[in-house]
Image (cartoon, grey):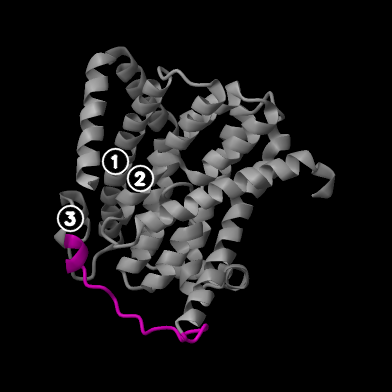
Amino acid sequence: MKTCLICFSSILLFALMLVLPADTLSGAKTGLLLWFQTVLPTLLPAMIVSDFLIRIQADRYLNQIFARPFSLLFGIRKSCAYAVLVGFLCGYPIGAKTSASLLLQGRIRRDEASYLLAFCNQPSPMFLIGFLCLSLLKEQGGISLALPILTGVYGSAVFISFLYRILRRLMLFIAAEDPNPVSLKQEPLSSAAPEKNASPLRAASLQKTTNPSPLTLLEHSMMTSFEVMVKIGGYMMLFSILEAFLLRVPMPVPLRSTAMGFVEMTTGSRQIAVSLPRLWAVAFCCGAAAFGGLSGLAQTANVLQDSGLSVRRYLLWKLLQGGLAVIIAILILCFPDGF
């Protein structure tokens, strides 16, 4: 059934591209220009440096600094602090990529990586303030909207972390297990597992070397990041083409704008900002940013493919976070004196 659905969707997309070449070209240009002008220069340097810090284990120093506050807030061990830090500051999909990298290196356990994935893969403050507030929503309030948007996105992520722990403890209680399990012994994963299904660039970056130099490790980080960024560009192009096709569908403007935000976060937010009233524009832009769009889901699935972490569970948590972000933003906008 799943294979048939994928085949049918692919054939339909190909047919639409042949029938609507102008929309295909317009959508492809929009996605690729957005990737080249905004996403690539913003995300690539952060991705390279983040991966390099993990390879040389310099993230341990940042773990020392942020371990205590993050442990109190999120209930994590010291080795997980870096993933939370970059996940909240560097944008999609660096939080997911960092969690997967730490898992593959045996630095964190699988249950810890699953927990991190539920809440630490977030849009960056630069995107939320610089792009949403100061660019798209400038006429609706500009920088004054930073509070509802930041609180909506990051507040919902913190709520998800609390909910995850509550549900996990409940499941452990139902299964008659200790709700506070002792940390399992960490055993580094062999590099053979990810190499088996890895792409050529990924396999090259994972090759064993004897005492690799920092320059070699940096080159490995660059090659891995280049591959990920090219795939992100491809996903942004394809989902921007889908959004161009959505503009052809006869439906109410608010519904179309919301659907576009669900498909691709950045271009969809632009459509939401110009077509909805202030309250709903801010709230749904906040929800789209918290969810990340189907394009962000595909990007996250790509960086998780060697880790074995569940993309389906990630999708469920992000859908919940998107809904919570909308509610939080509406509450703050409607009752500003209460916050």
Q: Position of residue 272 (x, y in %)?
A: 56, 27
Q: Which residue is mark 1?
A: 231
Circle 1 residues within 10 Å: few <14, some 14–19, many ≥20: some
Towards the viewer: 265 or 71: 265
Residue sitting at x 50%, y 72%: 168
Residue 132 spot, x, y in % from top left? 59, 34
Q: Nearer the viewer, residue 335 or 307?
A: 335
Q: CA distance from mark 2 to mark 1?
A: 7 Å
Of all residues, the one furthest to the front in this rendering is 1
Give amino acid for label 3. Answer: Ala
Residues shaded magenta: 176-195
Determine contact: label 2, label 1, CB under 8 Å: yes
Judge whether 54 appears above or below 177 on screen: above
Secondary structure of residue under mark 2: helix
For this rendering, which residue is in front, 103 or 114? 114
Is residue 190 magenta-colored?
Answer: yes
Residue 58 appears in the picture as rendered = no
Q: Is label 3 or label 1 in front?
A: 1
Residue 9 shown in magenta: no
Q: Please say if the residues under marks 3 and 1 sit with CB atoms less than 8 Å apart.
A: no
Q: Secondary structure at mark 1?
A: helix
Q: Is residue 56 left or right of residue 88?
A: left
Image position of 186 (left or right of 65): left
Q: Which residue is mark 2?
A: 299
Q: Give the total number of marks visible in the rendering.
A: 3
